[in-house]
Amino acid sequence: MNIQSSTRLRNDYGTISRMAHETREPIYITRNGEGDVVLMSNEAFEDRERALNERAAVLEAEARRLAGEPAFTTDEIREMLRERRSNGVA
């Protein structure tokens, strides 16, 4: 875990920014010795958001399956897509 002070962020932003991009890990910024904010590169943030959205979609699909909604195998999905393409439906 990388922890830096707000003073260091203010005085040495370039180094902390490079560190965030190189490590692709969050940097915890403290203020008066207490946790204040978390800094991360845009790329790391977008990767994290994408992973969280994917997990949410899987959990939602599992909840629907457990609620009794129909589920399909990979082969069934492929066949449905083939049929849609052959019928001119995109």
Image (cartoon, rainbow, N blue to C red):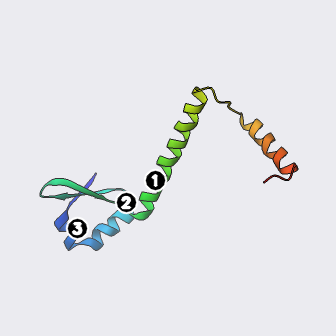
N-terminal-most mark, 3 or 2? 3
Do labels 1 and 2 touch, CB within 8 Å? no
Identified by mark 3, the residue type is Leu
| For residue 68, side relative to residue 21 (left or right) | right
Callout 2 secondary element:
helix
N-terminal-most mark, 1 or 2? 2
Q: Residues within 10 Å of mark 3 (few under 14, many from 20)?
A: some
Residue position marked by numbered label 2 in the rendering: 23
Which residue is more in the foreground, 22 or 82?
Answer: 82
Figure quadrant of residue 30: bottom left
- The answer to whether 32 is drawn above or below residue 56 in the figure is below
Residue depicted at 42% across the width and 58% down the height:
45
- Distance between the alpha carbons at the discs numbered 1 and 2: 17 Å
Identified by mark 1, the residue type is Glu
Callout 1 secondary element:
helix
Residue position marked by numbered label 1 in the rendering: 49
- The quadrant of the rendering that contains the C terminus is bottom right
Q: Position of residue 17 (x, y in %)?
A: 32, 68
The circle drawn on residue 9 is 3
Q: Residues within 10 Å of mark 1 (few under 14, many from 20)?
A: few
Q: Position of residue 68 (x, y in %)?
A: 62, 26
Q: Nearer the viewer, mark 1 or mark 3?
A: 1
Q: Nearer the viewer, mark 1 or mark 2?
A: 1
| For residue 41, side relative to residue 68 (left or right) | left
Instruction: Residue lying at the far left in this picture: please name it.
Output: 32
Q: Position of residue 2 (x, y in %)?
A: 27, 55
Identified by mark 2, the residue type is Thr
